[in-house]
Structures are given as C-alpha cells and as structure tokens.
Image (cartoon, coloured by chain):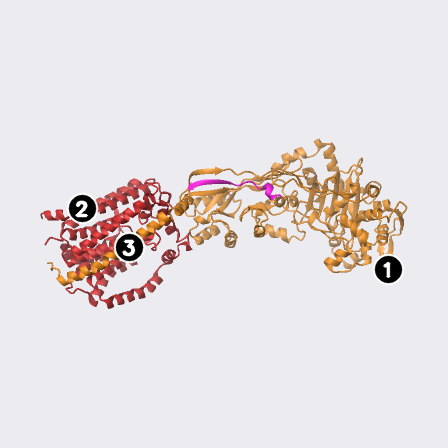
Chain colours: A red, B orange
C-alpha cells in the first residue's frame, strides 16, 4: 500500500505538535515530582508508553478509518470479553479491579474500551439515513455504550465508567435527538441519579459533598481538594518554578504525577503556565470541532464527535476536580497525566480524529 | 463500502455543531476564570497556606523554675520525659486514630474523647497531649506506626520532680493542665488550654514566676509529618528560681514528727512572718500529679477520710482550746480587768450561769494568779475572767490578733475560721449569742475555730510585744512577682502585758507547767498547751464509742527564746490526746532542730540534704 502524498500534505502538523507539547508538559511534571524518588523508573516508563503510543498513533493514522468501522464489531466484542476477564482476574490497584497484569505491563483495558465504544457507536448511528435518531436506535446505542460501562463499574472504577456517558450523549446529540427524547433521557437520568447516589460508597458521597461545601471536612475527604487548591493558588502568576512547588514536592498533593498533575503544573508554572495548558486543550478541542464539521461523511463526524466528547469530559472533570469545583474522581488529564493506558487511549482516539481530518478531501 | 453522506444529514450535523461551539469555549472560559480566581485573586492567601503546610511549628515546653528552700536546697526540679501528642491537623480519619490510641496505646476511648473535647477551642496547630510521661513500650509503638499514624507524635516535656516526695507537699502544691475554670477566669495570663500550670500551693500562687518561656522549633515537614530539616529554633527558657522561706531541715523534722499522726506543724520567724516549716499529715506525693494522676490515686486521695490533700495548717479550723487563754490574758491585762493582785481560788469546778464548769485538774489549782493560770492552764481563772469581761472585749481583741481573719499567707484556699463574736454569729449563723458560750470561749471552746497558722500568728504577736506579722513563704523570686509586701501590724498591746503573758508561758514550759515536755536545757522556751475536749469523760464512757474518734485534739504553741524570739512553733494533732503530752514534745524537737542548726550547723543535715536529694522518688 502506497502512502498517498495528499495524506501527508493534509496532515495537521500544528494539531500533532499540540499533542506532543501536552505530552512533554506531562513528562516535565513527572520529572519534577519524582526526581527525588524514582525518576528513571517513572519517566522511563512514560517514555516507553509514549513510543508505544506514537507507533499506535501512526499505524491507526495510516489506514483509512472506514476499515476500523468494518472490523469494529469484532473488536468491540473482544473488548467486552477482556473487560469481563479483568473482572475475574483483575489486578487491584487502589481497590480498583480494572487493571490487567500482562506480565511486564499492568494494563487498564477500560481506557481502550472507550475508543472502541466511540467507533462502534459512531458506526451504528451513522448507518441511519434519517437525520435524527429513533427510540430503538437510542436504546441500542445505549446498550453499546452502557454495556461496557456496567462492566467497568463492577470493577469498581466509577470514574472511568462515567466517561461512557458523555460519549453516548455527544454521539446521540450529533445523531439527532427529538425534543421529547431529550426530555425522556433527562428524566431517566434524574431517576437514575438518586438510585446511583444510594449505590455510592460513603467516601464517594463525601467527595461530592466536599465540593458543595469545601470547608466541611478539611482533614478528611476535604483534604485532597483543599491541598490541591492550595497548590494551584499558591502558584500565583508566574509559579514557583520547576521542582520548587512545595505542595507537590513535599507530598501534600495526592497522586501528584497522575490525576493531580494539573495542580503540580499550576503550582510550579503559575497562572501563565496553567492558562497556556488550558489554551492547548482549547486548541485541540477546536481542531476536533472543525474536523467534525469538515468530515467527509457521517461516520467520520460521529467518530470525531465521540473523541471530542471524551476529551472535553476528561479535561473538564480533571481540571475541575483539582480546582475544587468537581468531585474527585479518578479521571486522568489526557496526554498529561502519567499512565500508559490513558496515554495510549488518548493517542489512539486522537489518531482516529486526525485520520478523519487528513482524509476529509480524499475519496 | 461507504455511503456518501446525505446532504440533509450533513446540514443537520452542521447545524448541531454550530450549537456546540459556544458551550465548548464557555467551558474553557469558566476553567480559566477559576484559575484566575485561585491563582491571581486568592494567590497570596493560598501561598500563605502553602507556607504553613510545610513549615510546622513545634512548641518546646520550657521547664518551670526550680523551687529552693531558704538555703537554696532544691525542693522542686524537673526531669525529662516524653508525652504522646495528637496533631489534629494531621488527623485524617478520627475513627482510625481513636482505634489506634485505644488499642495500641491503652488510652480509654472516653478519656481520648474528653481530651479532644477539652481542646476544641485551642488552635489546631498545637498538638494536644493524649498520654503523659510514657514508657519505652509506648514510645516504640508510636515510632513503629509513624507512617500509618503521622498524627500521633512524641514530644519531650520536662516534668516536675518533687525531690523529697511528700515533703512540704501542701506548701509546694502540684502542677496539672490548666482547668477550664482558670481559663475562663484568665487566672494565668497568656496560658492556653493544655498548658501546665500550678494547681495548688506555691506552684499555683507563683505560677507566673515559675513559668518559663516556651521555645519554638520550626521544621520543614512533608505531608507524612516527616521532618525534612530545621528552619529555625528558639530555645525554651527555664522559669525563674523561687526561693522559699522554708528551711529544709526544719521541714523534714516536722514531717517526721508528724508521721503516723493527723495534724499540722508550722514554724515561723515571729519577727517577720517567714514560714520556716509547714507540714501537714497525712500528706501526698505531688509527683503523682506531675503525670496525669491515675483515677485510682486520685480516688484514694479524695476518699481518704483524713483528706490528705488538705493543708491542715491553713485549710482546717479547730477550737484553739487553752491556747486561747493567751488572748483572754491579753484582753484582761490591756482592758484593765487583770492586775497583779487578780487571782481566783480554783477548786476544780465552778458554776456560771447556773451551770457547772470544770477545770481540767479535778482537784483544783487552789490560789491562782494570771501567770500561774497560764502556766498551769487553769480553766477556773479564765472562766471567771471571761464572765467578768463579757464577750465584747474578747471578740475585739481576738479579732485584732487575727481570729476570724485571713493571715494573708501566700497560699491558696486559706480558711478564716470562726471568731468568738456575737456579731459574727448573728450575721453568719443567724443565731443569738448565749452568755454560757462566753464561758466556753474563755478556754477556747464553744463557737470559736481557728487554723493552726492563725493560732501561731497570734502567739507570735505575744512574743514580739504585739507585732502581728503576715506569714509568708516567698523569700526571693528571681523573676516576675514584685517582691512580696508582708506588712507587720503593731497591735496596741502593752509591752508589760505581753511580758506577763510570756512569763506564764515560760513557766508552762520551764516551771513544771503543762508544757514542760517542750523544755530544752539552756533555752528559754515559752509555750502554751491546749487540749480540746470533744466530749466529757463521763459521756465518753456512756457512748462506748471508738475512743480514738472522740480523743481530744492536742495543741502546743510557743516560741524561743523568751527575750529574743526568733522561732515560733505551733503543733496541732487531731485526736492526738493531751497538748502537754502529745504536742509539746514535738514542739521541743522543732526547737531543738532549729537551735542545733543555728549553733552547730555542721551537725545538721543541711549538707546531707543536698546529697540525699538524688535518691528521692
């Protein structure tokens, strides 16, 4: 198969550069927070994941995205099977049974499942010729999105499970929702919420309560958001400098190179750095929006829409969480947080979108 | 394989995406605004919080100043110890902490909860003490669990060491965590919940002089509370020396004399009111309070019917018995009721107001003048004098000599007693004065109560021609507390009257009087005995009570020497029997110790006191 020259020409280098920049920022954060302890281990591992992710990125980019749509049923079913397997033999990290130990690497299949769900749902919705979705389609689509979600939830990873909701919402929105369906869906959500609340564990309820009332429990469940806010706020305008953030360096921040990496960066790089980081995310979001609009076919738009929904949700929840406006949930910051599965899934999803983007003029 | 997108479909999607653009941008604007709020608007506040996060101030408790006797023999010092502290800012899961301290450190859940409650208002940046003076087992438990329980810490705390155990315990008092009452009243300026303060005795009265200045160590810590390094240190400064008027040798003599009895011995310099010894029995070991006292020890002290915590010298009042005859004599002489010719014939008993009153000598003293009446403690003489004078001058002179008045000693909780006064009885008790009571009061019984110190102070005034001193314990405070002003009041006692009374008292000790057991060869000791009968001899037989419960109280008060008084002593023994038999010999030993030390310092224990201190406790 010969690489089409036009593919190279229409490849959005700026977009790709933004992704690499985000990843690089994440690497400096890992450097800064683990320098005293285990730098080579964490940084080396992340670099390894980056290489792997870039390979996956290029491979996924090389083939036309329609091919993936053709094989998605198989991939999706395999994904479900693996999720089921994880439930049985999963490797528990922080009481989450969502990690699969593959000998050398511990892997989190749920991260990749999100990408599979995006493609599967995109394909399913794109097949309708109507410009809106009917009830059976919404229900089937719900099954496609929420089947894996239930499995992930059973594994105990509520944060990851919730990310299937924006995928379903985003794609359904783009597929076309009738007003009455929106009402019904919102009603259903309203009904599920209290039931969901009851199913939450006490610490999860507490996390939600501390967002509503930050000073309620500063030593307990309010500790992490409070420390995180202190980290961000104390960064001020210019930040404390590389490796100078006391909150991150002295261990007041939890999960400081993973879920709370934004707080570390905000502390060390200040408002200038954190707003720039947000700017990068906004840039990527707008690129996704544009690709969604310019995609040459419905399935392309649908895939990009799914990626956009997932991406936005991750950014909003993660940064909102460290800024103390959203309850703490184990949701990583795309490209920035340390963690192989997340990085791989982010690059894979972005590769699909750029795949759609580069082929927007190609028939 | 791919269907081309239908135009209508495409338009619908374009339409929907237009709707999507503003909310996406809005999300980022809101996130950016939040960043602006946190980092720019509230930045300095969070910067301060971050500073506090990493720099932890650790209070270094300053040792209290040592308490010394008048020869600078240390009575109270400090010893190092470790406390277990709870840093509430580090406590993430109170229930886990509670489980840890109850299961591993043996602190009862109730005590722990109470301690938390007590310190609720105190700043959380200050760790609170949850267990004091811990041993090696607790230390290793805390050390072993530093990672899981960074909130549980060890803190050095100097602890009070009362070198001679219960010696002078009532005078020295003890320390403990400041009470809520004292906090509310701001008794000790600058003291916060959890601080140690004097709870009684000298420790309490001179708390501010003894307090040191706590130091601060500022250390850099991580979120696990591990110290990463020291930023700054301000050393703790030990509190000032406090030198007491107490003489160790005299005090320990008093303590050993009282061993096994219930009572009090006080020795004072009658010229200036300096207390040389003040002992009470039973007593207690204040060292038990320097750690948090155990419930068992506390109950034992509180439920003991002999009330070991009471300082009998100033907190218990008793009828002064025959010692009050000195006040009667002074009143009689200075009011002109008695002159050299005044005498009675004592037949052992006499009737007053249609009631028969007895002399202690059943066969009577025969011809008795004032001097003889004091020497032999003749009741009939003073009954007669009391009847002649009436209560009014007696009440007036008793008050002047300090009966019913606080002596002003620098100790907390002094009692006033009951003055022999119709006004007082009317005001306080709402009862009328009966003429018969005047007869009883004439020999120091009936409605009259005084502390041993009040008695001693009155007798001292006789010794010094009417100089009424303010008894006190402070000789010199290195720091704080303006040097005490201890006023000496000159009473309108004629020197001639005082001399006559002293002659009677000299006779009591040296001329075959009731106090002869107090005599020491070569010393002109003056004294007066007192025996407070709680119940008449006949009644005693009738009641068939435990004889020790109704045994008389024994008194002796005296001074030496007659012409140059420099030490006055009072001995009081609850149910101790006769004053002459039980109390006077103890007073003699006090005088012996005093003068032996004065004239032969090399023979006494002052040198050995220093040496024996090490083995105390």
Chain of residue at mark 1? B
Q: Residue at x 67, y 34 (%)?
A: B606
Provide the secondary structure element on which disc 1 rests: loop
When asked about the image quadrant of residue A181, the answer is: bottom left
Provide the secondary structure element on which disc 3 rests: helix
Q: Position of residue A270 (x, y in %)?
A: 33, 45
Chain of residue at mark 3? B
Q: Which mark is residue B354?
A: 1
- Left or right? Give the position of A218 relative to A145: right
Does B215 appear in magenta? yes
**What span is in magenta?**
B206-220
Q: Which mark is residue A13?
A: 2
Q: Which of disc 1 and disc 3 is earlier in sequence?
A: 3
Q: Position of residue A199 (x, y in %)?
A: 34, 61
Q: Residue at x 35, y 50 (%)?
A: B37
Decide: few, some or many residues near mark 3? Use Cα within 10 Å; few <14, some 14-19, many ≥20: some
Q: Is residue A189 visible?
A: yes
**Looking at the image, which is closer to me, B117 or B511?**
B117
Residues beneath discs 1 and 2 located on the same chain: no
Q: Position of residue B78 (x, y in %)?
A: 57, 40
Whether B583 is drawn above or below B522: the answer is below
**Camera-nearest label, 1 or 2:** 2
**Looking at the image, which is closer to me, A324 or B554?**
A324
When asked about the image quadrant of residue B468, the answer is: top right
Q: Which mark is residue B27?
A: 3
């Amino acid at each position: 198969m010969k690489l089409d020259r036009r593919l190279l020409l229409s490849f959005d280098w700026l977009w790709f550069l933004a992704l690499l920049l985000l990843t690089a920022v994440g690497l400096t954060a890992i450097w800064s927070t683990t320098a005293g302890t285990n730098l080579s281990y964490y940084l080396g591992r992340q670099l390894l994941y980056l290489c792997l992710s870039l390979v996956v990125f290029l491979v996924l980019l090389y083939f036309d995205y329609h091919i993936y749509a053709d094989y998605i049923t198989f991939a999706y079913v395999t994904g479900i099977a693996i999720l089921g397997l994880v439930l049985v033999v999963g490797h528990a990290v922080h009481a989450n049974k969502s990690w699969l130990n593959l000998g050398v690497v511990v892997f989190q299949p749920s991260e990749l499942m999100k990408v599979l769900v995006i493609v599967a749902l995109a394909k399913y919705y794109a097949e309708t010729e109507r410009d809106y979705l009917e009830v059976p389609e919404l229900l089937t689509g719900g099954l496609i999105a929420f089947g894996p979600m239930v499995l992930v939830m059973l594994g105990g990873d509520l944060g990851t499970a919730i990310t299937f909701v924006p995928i379903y919402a985003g794609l359904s929105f783009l597929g076309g929702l009738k007003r009455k369906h929106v009402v019904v869906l919102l009603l259903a959500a309203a009904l599920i919420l209290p039931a969901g609340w009851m199913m939450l564990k006490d610490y999860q309820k507490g996390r939600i309560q501390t967002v509503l009332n930050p000073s309620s429990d500063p030593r307990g469940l309010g500790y992490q958001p409070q420390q995180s806010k202190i980290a961000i706020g104390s960064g001020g305008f210019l930040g404390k400098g590389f490796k100078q953030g006391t909150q991150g360096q002295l261990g007041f921040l939890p999960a400081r190179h993973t879920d709370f990496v934004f707080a570390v960066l905000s502390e060390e790089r200040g408002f200038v750095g954190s707003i720039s980081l947000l700017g990068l995310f906004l840039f990527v979001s707008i690129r996704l929006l544009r690709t969604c609009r310019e995609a040459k076919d419905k399935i392309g738009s649908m895939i990009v829409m799914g990626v956009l929904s997932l991406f936005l949700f991750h950014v909003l929840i993660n940064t909102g969480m460290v800024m103390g406006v959203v309850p703490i949930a184990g949701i990583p910051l795309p490209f920035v947080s340390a963690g192989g599965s997340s990085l791989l899934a982010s690059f894979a999803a972005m590769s699909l979108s750029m795949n759609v983007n580069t082929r927007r003029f190609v028939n | 394989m791919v269907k081309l997108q239908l135009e209508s479909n495409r338009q619908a999607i374009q339409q929907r995406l237009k709707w999507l653009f503003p909310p996406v941008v809005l999300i980022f604007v809101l996130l950016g605004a939040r960043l602006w709020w946190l980092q720019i608007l509230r930045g300095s506040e969070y910067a301060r919080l971050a500073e506090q996060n990493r720099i932890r101030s650790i209070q270094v408790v300053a040792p209290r100043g040592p308490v010394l006797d008048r020869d600078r023999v240390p009575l109270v010092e400090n010893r190092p110890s470790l406390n277990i502290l709870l840093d509430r800012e580090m406590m993430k899961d109170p229930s886990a902490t509670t489980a840890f301290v109850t299961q591993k450190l043996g602190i009862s859940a109730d005590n722990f909860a109470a301690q938390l409650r007590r310190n609720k208002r105190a700043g959380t940046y200050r760790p609170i003490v949850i267990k004091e003076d811990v041993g090696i087992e607790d230390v290793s438990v805390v050390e072993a669990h530093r990672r899981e329980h960074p909130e549980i810490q060890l803190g050095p705390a100097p602890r009070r060491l009362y070198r001679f155990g219960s010696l002078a315990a009532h005078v020295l008092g003890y320390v403990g965590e400041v009470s809520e009452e004292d906090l509310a009243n701001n008794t000790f300026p600058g003291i916060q919940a959890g601080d140690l303060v004097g709870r009684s005795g000298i420790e309490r009265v001179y708390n501010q002089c003894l307090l040191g200045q706590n130091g601060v160590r500022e250390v850099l810590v991580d979120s696990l509370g591990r110290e990463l390094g020291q930023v700054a240190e301000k050393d703790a400064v030990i509190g000032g020396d406090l030198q007491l008027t107490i003489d160790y040798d005299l005090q320990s003599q008093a303590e050993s004399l009282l061993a096994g009895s219930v009572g009090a011995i006080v020795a004072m310099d009658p010229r200036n009111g300096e207390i040389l010894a003040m002992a009470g029995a039973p007593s207690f070991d204040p060292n038990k309070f320097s750690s948090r006292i155990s419930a068992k020890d506390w109950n034992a002290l509180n439920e003991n019917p002999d009330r070991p915590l009471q300082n009998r010298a100033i907190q218990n009042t008793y009828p002064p018995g025959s010692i009050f005859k000195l006040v009667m004599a002074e009143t009689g002489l200075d009011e002109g009721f008695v002159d050299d010719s005044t005498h009675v014939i004592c037949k052992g008993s006499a009737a007053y107001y249609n009631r028969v009153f007895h002399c202690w000598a059943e066969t009577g003293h025969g011809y008795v003048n004032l001097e003889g009446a004091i020497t032999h403690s003749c009741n009939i003489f003073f009954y007669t004098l009391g009847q002649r004078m009436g209560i009014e001058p007696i009440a007036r002179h008793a008050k002047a000599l300090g009966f019913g008045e606080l002596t002003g000693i620098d100790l907390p909780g002094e009692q006033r007693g009951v003055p022999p006064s119709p006004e007082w009885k009317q005001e306080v008790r709402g009862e009328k004065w009966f003429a018969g009571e005047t007869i009883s009061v004439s020999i120091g019984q009936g409605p009259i109560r005084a502390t041993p110190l009040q008695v001693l102070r009155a007798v001292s005034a006789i010794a010094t021609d009417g100089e009424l001193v303010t008894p006190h314990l402070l000789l010199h405070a290195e720091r704080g507390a303006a040097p005490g002003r201890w006023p000496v009041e000159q009473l309108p006692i004629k020197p001639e009257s005082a001399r006559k009374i002293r002659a009677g008292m000299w006779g009591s000790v040296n001329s075959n009087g009731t106090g002869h057991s107090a005599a020491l060869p070569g010393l002109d000791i003056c004294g007066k005995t007192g025996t407070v009968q709680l119940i008449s001899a006949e009644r005693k037989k009738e009641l068939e009570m435990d004889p020790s419960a109704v045994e008389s109280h024994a008194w002796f008060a005296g001074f030496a020497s007659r012409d140059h008084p420099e030490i006055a002593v009072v001995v009081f023994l609850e149910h101790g029997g006769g004053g002459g038999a039980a109390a006077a010999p103890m007073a003699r030993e006090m005088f012996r110790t005093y003068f032996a030390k004065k004239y032969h310092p090399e023979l006494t224990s002052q040198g050995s006191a220093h040496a024996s201190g090490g083995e105390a406790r």
